[in-house]
Image (cartoon, rainbow, N blue to C red):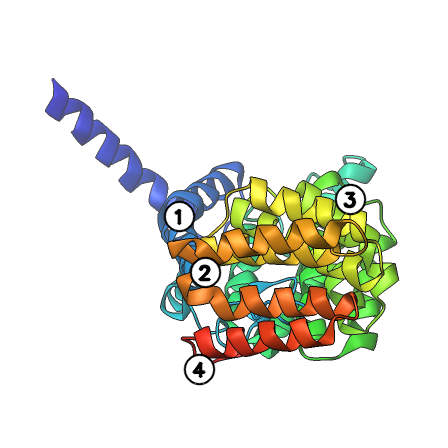
Amino acid sequence: MKLVKIYIALLAICLLLPACSTKKNTAGSRFWHSFTTRYNVFFNGNEAYKKGCETKENGNKDNYTEIIPVFMVGNESSATLGSTNFDIAITKCEKSIQLHSIKKRPKVDAGKKQTPKMKAYLARKEFNPFLKNAWLLMGKAQFQKGDFSAASATFSYITRLYAAEPLVANEARIWQARCYSALDWYYDAEESLSAAERDTLDKALGILRDATKADLLLQQGKIADALPYLANAADAEKNKIKKARLYFLLGQIYQKEGRSQEAYKALGKCIKLSPPYELSFNAQIMQTEVLSEGQNASGMIKRLKKMAKSSKNKEYLDQVYFAMGNIHMAQMDTSTAISAYEKGRKESTRNGI
């Protein structure tokens, strides 16, 4: 009985395949190509993309003595991490598009009055309802790989291909702005964001816009303008590692603006997320620096000395004593600051910053 069902299913598939050509646009062909795009080629590409992002997150190395970038791909040392997986994702997306794109318009009754909704549907250039995901994933994989020129070209094409679908086009415009910002094409990035903002953005696109706008403004040195967008992006981020990084960056920006209490709170949010140790450590170090004025100085020095005694911080003693020196300098205690700096130089085990 089971074999009979299998034979019937195979026969049905064989009969359906001619009707499911991409040269035909019917409810059946659209369903078939949408289904096979989602659960075959795209699925594998998306899994590769997620693995690539995970590799980048686990291997990312930020320079915490400088303002860290909003996106990990902004670190030169991290830009190529996960490239193999991103290449696989790009290849899978290209295959999805090649095999399952439906450009032919569906047949409509010439005598039937078309509603605005139907007119908008017929204005589309792509009729596979799932293929937009493959296009967007390809652009994202190119961006994460650090190939910003290719990614910007992909997103630019998406805005034209999906001009009749504002949500898709605007998501592409926001990602396009990220690419332009990474290439230092700030005017073009502003134009892309402005074009996206002409339409009402849903919640998901609003979050995407906030992170992108924060990145653009920070790269332009417009720190105060970037703060509200960065705060929104940090609060909305769901990935714990990315969220912790954004809170750390928020702490850095608040400190630069002289808003010590807010910097301390942002860094506390970073620490509470239990991020990778180096990020947590640097957030703790920075907390001592932002609250080292007046009566807080002695308490922060005690906290740093306690950190220096921990075996977990043996590799980071240079930073601990550097932070102590900075606090003493803020208190105009130059000789003690010099002693702390010398101690940090002596205890350093890294040939880095």
Q: Horizontal and vertical percent for residue 299?
A: 67, 49
Element at badge 4?
loop
Between residue 35 and residue 222, name the one nearer to us. Answer: 222
Q: Quadrant of residue 227?
A: bottom right
The extreme front residue here reads 335
Q: Horizontal and vertical percent for residue 186?
A: 79, 76
Total numbered badges shown on the rendered structure: 4
Closer to the chain start, of discs 3 and 4, is: 3
Element at badge 2?
helix
Between residue 278 and residue 157, name the one nearer to us. Answer: 278
Q: Which residue is mark 2?
A: 93
Q: Which residue is mark 1?
A: 43
Closer to the chain start, of discs 4 and 1, is: 1
Q: Which residue is mark 4?
A: 351
Closer to the chain start, of discs 4 and 2, is: 2
What is the distance, in whole Å, between disc 4 and disc 2 at their CAs?
42 Å
Task: Classify mark 1: residues with Cα within 10 Å, few (<14), some (14-19) or many (20+).
Answer: some
Marks 1 and 2 in Cβ contact (< 8 Å): no
Q: Nearer the viewer, mark 2 or mark 3?
A: 2
Q: Quadrant of residue 286?
A: bottom right
What is the distance, in whole Å, between disc 4 and disc 1 at their CAs?
43 Å
Q: Quadrant of residue 314?
A: bottom left
* Left or right of 200 on screen, residue 66: left
What is the distance, in whole Å, between disc 3 and disc 4 at their CAs?
65 Å
Identify the residue at horizontal 76%, vertical 35% (top origin).
Answer: 112
Q: Which residue is mark 3?
A: 119
Q: Taking the image as drawn, is residue 163 in sight?
A: no
* Left or right of 12 on screen, residue 210: right
* Left or right of 21 on screen, residue 343: right
Kind of residue indicated by mark 4:
Asn
Element at badge 1?
helix
